[in-house]
Image: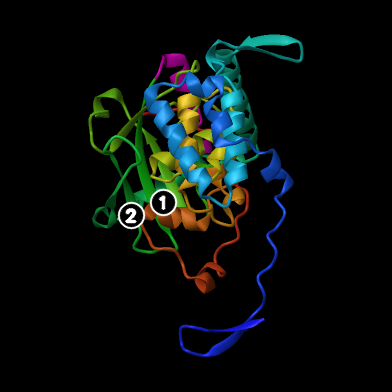
Amino acid sequence: MRGVTDKEGAQRVEPPAAAPAAPSAAAETAPTPESLRRHPAYRALSATDRRVADRILEHAETSPRRAYYLTKLKLLLDTPYRDPTTAVTTTRGVAKPFAERQLDKLTDALRRAAALLAKVPAEERAAYLRREESATDAVPAREWEARPAGYGNKIFWVSRRDPENIRVKVNIYLDANPEIERSVLHLEDAIEKYVSIPGFTVNLRFVKREAAGRRDVVTVKADPTQWTTALNWVGTYESLAHELMHVLGLKDEYDMIDVHAGNANMKVGARLHWFSVQMTRPPPPADANTGIMTCRGRTLRRHARQVAGLPPEQPDAASRGVTLRPQPSPTSNPRRR
């Protein structure tokens, strides 16, 4: 051992340097940057995508996660794009194209929502369906504040005077064919009740075409030939609740490298982009895998505060937060405002 002087001038004993650790099995088997640059898929990249791939390789070279990044990048390059919208998938012996599978999700969501609504006593049903509307109707006009939406320079409305009783109004214009439009409108209440938790109420309001140009109206489509996204509302009410939270400004909290590196249904350029983004993101919150932004749970208390533009709670305050309990997600009569 040898003595060294720390910043304050005090002597401390430093143990002898450890022998270099043997490379891990992962490091020994990880591809090299040179081998990845010789990969046929790398050579086929556009100039723009190749620049992104090179940034990934440069970052990986100096990262303690070098082996992980290089292995995942090889997986990405090994996985060619397969357009999901042209694929026919066989389930239980029945071959169905992508659009039909998307519509099946919508149909199943309508069935499940209706079954949950049927459990509500008939005499309570009208009030139950208007629960979110009643909560926001009770807010004085002066208490509503505009918050930036996640898309299109749009806004939504928040009442946050009482941080324990946040209320949100968000207007959506659904640009879709009439049949699909009616189905999605039927899920309005199911989406509201899935995204709302005690102390956080969201009133989702579908508006008519003539309101689409307003700054407080976000326009989305419902195209079954495309993936469900924040701007394409075809799917289950759970997935649409997740997309609604994107409209309210929240970002995904899952690891985009783990999820998308080997995702054949995403174009290679898009996968490279999200790979690069993930490399510079902070680690997800410890509770991310229990929340709506990983599609593995409901809205978390911190999500509600983010939507409202409130600072994170202190740990002692958060520990006194509400206990989330699943709420039924019934359907409602479709209506436009």
CB-based contact (under 8 Å), mark 2 and mark 1? yes
Q: Identify the magenta region.
A: 176-191
Query: How many marks do you count on the picture?
Result: 2
* Residue assigned mark 1: 135
Q: Position of residue 2 (x, y in %)?
A: 63, 82
In the picture, measured across the screen, residue 140 lies left or right of residue 11, that is: left
* Residue assigned mark 2: 139
Three-letter code, disc 1: Ala
Few, some or many C-alpha atoms within 10 Å of disc 1 (few <14, some 14-19, many ≥20)? Answer: some
51 w.r.t. 320: above or below = above
Farthest-out residue, front = 2
In the picture, measured across the screen, residue 42 lies left or right of residue 204, that is: right
Q: Residue at x 59, y 27 (%)?
A: 263
Q: Quadrant of the C terminus?
A: top left
Q: Residue at x 66, y 77 (%)?
A: 15
Q: Secondary structure at mark 1?
A: helix
Res. 251 in view: yes
